[in-house]
Image (cartoon, rainbow, N blue to C red):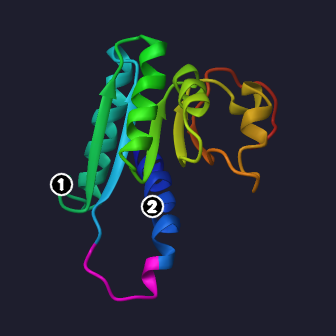
Amino acid sequence: MKIVAVLAVLATLALLAAPLAAETQPARVYRVGVVHQGGAYSKAVVGLREALKELGFEEGKQVILDVHDVQGDLKSVEVAAKTLEAAKVDLIVSVSSSTTLAVKRATQSMPIVFYAGSNPVNLGDWFRASGSPEGGSQVSTVSTWTSPGSARSC
């Protein structure tokens, strides 16, 4: 599963880099913000780092992870997300549905990849409309949700 999560992050980075491919430029180091609530959610960050390494990406050379452990404080999630957006990271990875909702609320145009334990279809209209061209954050998901729910696909 961690390979799928890393592939989603890398695919998003590749889409962001597409305009640069036409020009020969030095290798770019991507900055990825990561926001999680600490505790058991820290394992997702460990898995992300391990999978990046397994795929040949060296942290600090091809990618820099700017990790924010908000220790369960959802108000701190919004502060962290705004800080990451102001720092102009290439995308934000959020871990958990509640963290993702807070990141989405706090950012204006930041690409978000999230790992959720809930069925993202149940998260509401913001998810279904997130790909709209009117602006706002673009949201992608890597998810294994806890309830099988419906057979609907995102």
Q: Quadrant of the C terminus?
A: top right
**Label 1: few (<14), some or many (≥20) within 10 Å?**
few
Give, as a three-letter code, the residue at label 2: Leu
Nearer to the camera, 107 or 59:
107
**Residue 1 visible, this orientation:** no
- Image side of residue 88 versus residue 51, left or right: right
Range shown magenta: 20-27
Count of all numbered marks drawn on residues in the image: 2
Extreme-front residue of the structure: 86
Where residue 1 sits in the image (x, y, percent)? Answer: 46, 42
Q: Is residue 112 above or below residue 121?
A: below
Q: Please tell me which residue lies in front, 63 or 145.
A: 63
Is residue 90 something one can see in this rendering?
Answer: yes
Mark 2 is surrounded, within 10 Å at the Cα level, by few (under 14), some (14 to 19) or many (20 or more) other residues, namely some
59 or 148, nearer to the observer: 59
Distance between the alpha carbons at the discs numbered 1 and 2: 16 Å
> Is residue 67 found inside the magenta-colored segment of the image?
no
Q: Which residue is mark 1?
A: 60
Residue 19's x, y, as percent? 50, 77
Q: Secondary structure at mark 2?
A: helix
Q: Residue at x 45, y 70 (%)?
A: 17
**Which x, y percent locates residue 61?**
18, 61
The residue lying at 27 percent from left, 63 percent from top is: 29
Residue at (51%, 58%) from the top-left corner? 12
**Image quadrant in which you'd find residue 153:** top right
Q: Amino acid at mark 1?
A: Gly
Residue on which disc 2 sits: 13
Proximity of marks 1 and 2: CB atoms separated by less than 8 Å? no
- In the rendered structure, find residue 129 and report the number of the disc placed on it: none
Please tell me whether the stretch drawn in magenta is mainly helix, strand or loop.
loop
